[in-house]
Amino acid sequence: MNCAKIIAAISFSAACFGLAHAQAPSITVDPSRHGNLASAQESVAQAYGRISEAQRDNSAHLGGHAQRAKDFLTQANQEIGLAASQSDANQSEAVSSAPPLSQPVAPPAMTGANISGNWTIYAYNVSQPGSSLKEIQISQDGNIVSGTFHGPHQKGHLQGWINGNHVEFSTDTRDVLTFRGEVTPEGMSGMYGIHGEHAPWKAQRN
């Protein structure tokens, strides 16, 4: 084996090692600045969660293919985050080089769907097979949402915001749950996180 092939083999091994130790995807992109990229990250995290369920259902006997798919999803999630960071850097450079405006221009007011009311959340468990029901009551003041949360093992208040059809809220409970998703004609759906793990959720208005 010549020197070039040895270097290529070492580089490939290092890349595989990095993927094998990748972390689960998390939502790092600000949806108010990069809605499409944030939605892409949510899709990646949802796919990662579904593959994890498949591994549990099959006792992880999937020939390593499922784990490699999860590793590539983690890498894709990181690239999406880097794309958002690059866009922010480009916008900062454009603003700094732009000529001063004669009068300040106010940013457009955010508008969001009305999600006030009582909802039932159907959420997949993050650490074991199956799902659970959670009840929430939401009050909305403009783009700010607040209310109460009642799950199978804990209850408390919640708070968050809505921007267009994108919604995000967290529970004020012992184990904090953060729900991110989209409002649709059928309800709400997305991914939620707890202790760094993520799983899909959907909600229907009562």
Image (cartoon, rainbow, N blue to C red):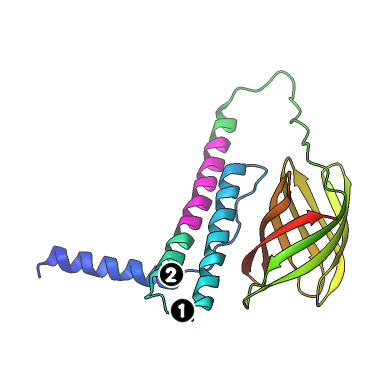
- Name the mark on residue 25: none
User: Which kind of residue does numbered mark 1 sit on?
Assistant: Ala
Q: Which residue is mark 2?
A: 66
* Crowd band around label 1 with a 10 angstrom C-alpha radius: few (<14), some (14–19), many (20+): some
- Whether residue 121 is in magenta: the answer is no
Is 165 placed above or below 66 here?
above
Quarter that holds the C terminus: bottom right
- Whether residue 89 is in magenta: the answer is yes
Magenta part, dominant SS: helix
**Which residue is depicted at the point 71% across and 45% down?**
184
Kindly indicate whether the residue at mark 2 contacts the one at mark 1 (C-beta within 8 angstroms): yes
Q: Nearer the viewer, residue 84 or 158?
A: 158
Q: Is residue 3 left or right of residue 177?
A: left
- Name the mark on residue 60: 1
Measure how far apart labels 1 and 2 are at the Cα level: 8 Å
The magenta-colored residue range is 76-92
**Which residue is depicted at the point 15% across and 65% down?**
5
Q: Secondary structure at mark 1?
A: loop
* Crowd band around label 2 with a 10 angstrom C-alpha radius: few (<14), some (14–19), many (20+): some
**Which residue is depicted at the point 86% across and 71% down?**
155
Sequence-first tag of 1 and 2? 1
Is 7 placed above or below 98 here?
below
Q: Nearer the viewer, residue 204 or 2?
A: 204
Q: Secondary structure at mark 2?
A: helix
User: Which kind of residue does numbered mark 2 sit on?
Assistant: Ala
Task: Provide residue 126's location: percent of width, then percent of height.
Answer: 64, 72
Task: Provide residue 15's location: percent of width, then percent of height.
Answer: 34, 66
Q: Is residue 131 visible?
A: yes
**Which residue is depicted at the point 71% across and 18% down?**
102
Task: Provide residue 28's location: percent of width, then percent of height.
Answer: 60, 55
